[in-house]
Image (tube, grey):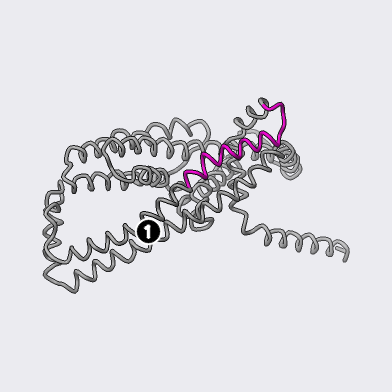
Amino acid sequence: MDNRRLARIALVALLAIGCALILQPFIAAILFAGVICITSWPMYAWLLARVRNRAWLAALLMTLLLTLVVVLPTALLAASLTEVTPALIVKIRLLIEQAQGAPPDWLHRIPFFGEQLDAYWQSLTRSRDEFNLLLRRFYDPTRRFLLSAGVLVGEGLLQLVLVLFVVFFLYRDGPALAARLSVLSRKLGGDLGEQMLALTQSTVNGVMVGIVGTAAAQALVALVGFVIAGVPGAMLLAAATFFLSMVPIGPPLVWGGAAIWLYDQGQFGWSAFMLAWGLLAISSVDNFLKPFLISRTASLPILLIALGVFGGALAFGFVGIFLGPVLLAVALALTEEFSAAAPPGTDNT
């Protein structure tokens, strides 16, 4: 290998490293913008035909629509968390201070395990130091979690603004970018490269429709139940249901907590209604709607979804909640397709 070739390879490597360093803070936003474009492209194509193929206008209208659907609810959620978190922290502190004595009267009335909790509480109160240590261990992580949730949503709002900025250009130049990707995949992998590109598109659609569609449906059903039962902060709880619905046993933490709050308020009938609504309405959405939405496009193991949500949030922040499962599902689908056994008599050489 001559010096000129080595110089060209070194130059290309340095250029690639420089581009990666420049784009590194925006990788999550770019990837998520691509996911949104792939998922919503049929709607964009329909809108493009209605505005006489003026790509910039269709891209602008789609970006404004996504702003109303994505950014506005996130902004309302961030504002609600900012308003509610300090008061909730103070409330938790007051409950802990009041708890340093006899257990509350309602504790033993909790069905199934109330008496055991009441007995455990009484045993703790006999040892004041152990009781205070237990309360401190509960309060500090809860306070940090609430503050971290507010920061995550606030940062997510900024990330979504950047995502929509990128989305506009992806919509406007989408056909040209798709053509270049098709040519590149063919040059790199031939027919297999094009198959992998098509599989990536179908998997992204399946994951986004299955996970996000189910989460939105569960949040809407939960919101109806919260409003009917008169639970305060219904919009905030519905937003929590939306995000927690992407992980196993997430929504029951929300509607179960609402049922416990209603029970504590003496509203036993509404508490029973909330439990029934959660079991029969909210949870049924996940059991029936998600398999229907993703049955023809992608198979999503529960472990993959959970790891994608938590790992994505740790790696990419707020948008990683949605981006993580998508990336893992695409990687899984490509791996399964690439490693699938060839039919008998097929020559892979």
Q: Is residue 137 left or right of residue 248?
A: left
Q: Amino acid at mark 1?
A: Leu
Q: Residue furthest bottom?
A: 129
Residue at x 72%, y 62% (from the top left corner): 18
Dividing the picture into quarters, in which one does residue 316 lie? bottom right
Is residue 205 shown above or below 248?
Answer: above
Q: Which residues are magenta?
A: 51-74
- Residue for badge 1: 146
Front-lying residue, 303 or 213: 213
Identity of the residue drawn at 27% across and 40% down? 230
Quadrant location of the N terminus?
A: bottom right
Q: Is residue 338 magenta?
A: no
Task: Give the side of residue 220 with respect to residue 312, left or right.
Answer: left
Q: Secondary structure at mark 1?
A: helix
Residue 20's place in the image compared with 175, above or below, is below
Residue 349 occupies which quadrant of the picture?
top right
Residue 207 drawn at (x, y percent): 51, 39
Q: Position of residue 153 (x, y in %)?
A: 47, 53
Give percent across and percent down for residue 255.
Answer: 30, 43
Residue 64 is inside the magenta segment:
yes
